[in-house]
Amino acid sequence: MYEDLKNKTALVTGAGRRKGIGFAMAQALAATGTNVVITDLALPPAGGDAGPQPDVHSLAEELAAEYGVQTLGIEMDVTDGESIAAAVPKVKEKFGRLDVLCNNAGAAFGVPSPVQSYQEDAWMKTIDVNLHGPFRVSRAFIPIMMGAPSSIINVASRAGKVPPIMNGAYAVAKAGVIMLTKVMAKEMAPAGIRINAICPGQIMTDFQVHRFGLEAKFFNTTPEERIKEMCKTIPLGRIADPSEVGDLVAYLASKQSSYITGQAINITGGQLMEL
């Protein structure tokens, strides 16, 4: 499937966690024969995502061994322009160009908290990672994506369309990602670069497990009860596996979606059916 992706090169930000959406994207792309660049922070952001420290190098080696593709692990901070700029020549030197860019890196700081008591530093950092990060990374890598049909997939969220409580900065940032996607899609269409966003709902990642734990404390219940209550809001009655997001990304990266650009596609099990 997706033979056109074979020997192409993709970069996925925030892909350093084995149970995360980013690594699932990298796996799905590698399974098509795409060479993959995995990037993430050298250390997990304090107060944000939960889970073990990312190890982009060992994960890249695993993908290379399993799928027989070329891979590269790069420690990169999407909030640091110099860090991003330093990654570009590494990708160009090894692969020559970039064909697929997945802006996946994300985090939520200072939650749960209502807007009136949200710590300003936490609010700004959340916006910086989730909204300014995709802008910075896209601006840096688009020059080595020119000259051939390419695809950028930005990870937005259901929260960018339907406001959640106690997580305002994340929701505002993801709403911004949706508009950024549309602006970029119009600007880059003449160059043959398609840009789409995906809007995941409940995906069982380390981040989601961490969130259920926080919510359980806030609502004085258990994580298991929070999961059960959440599933009641999902018509398909379950929380998705990260691999299901990876499958959507592979489709959007391939020529099978060649007439799709500027869209924000829901992957929510029916939890959100509006555009």
Image (spheres, helix red, strand yellow):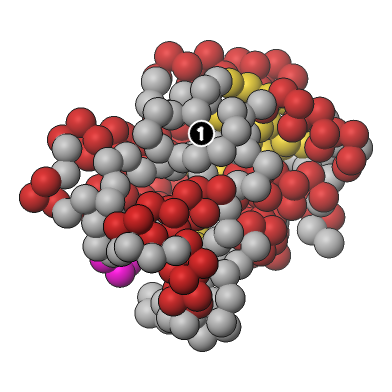
The image shows residue 100 at horizontal and vertical percentages of 63, 43
The image shows residue 174 at horizontal and vertical percentages of 34, 53
| Residue 266 located within the stretch drawn in magenta | no
Name the element at disc 1. helix
Residue 150 can be seen, yes or no: no
Q: Residue 213's quadrant in the figure?
A: bottom left
Residue 212 can be seen, yes or no: yes
Q: Is residue 135 left or right of residue 17?
A: left
Q: The N terminus lies in which quarter of the figure? A: bottom right
Residue in view at x 88 percent, y 42 percent: 67
Main SS of the magenta part reads loop
Q: Magenta region: which residues? A: 159-163
The image shows residue 80 at horizontal and vertical percentages of 39, 20
Q: Nearer the viewer, residue 223 or 232?
A: 223
Residue picked out by circle 1: 142
Q: Residue 133's quadrant in the figure?
A: top left
Q: Is residue 228 above or below residue 58?
A: below
Q: Residues within 10 Å of mark 1 (few under 14, many from 20)?
A: many
Q: Nearer the viewer, residue 219 or 84?
A: 219
The image shows residue 129 at horizontal and vertical percentages of 37, 36
Residue in view at x 30 percent, y 64 percent: 219
Residue in view at x 75 percent, y 47 percent: 27
| Residue 162 located within the stretch drawn in magenta | yes
Residue in view at x 60 percent, y 67 percent: 240
Q: The C terminus lies in which quarter of the figure? A: bottom left
Kind of residue indicated by mark 1: Ile
Q: Is residue 159 left or right of residue 265?
A: left
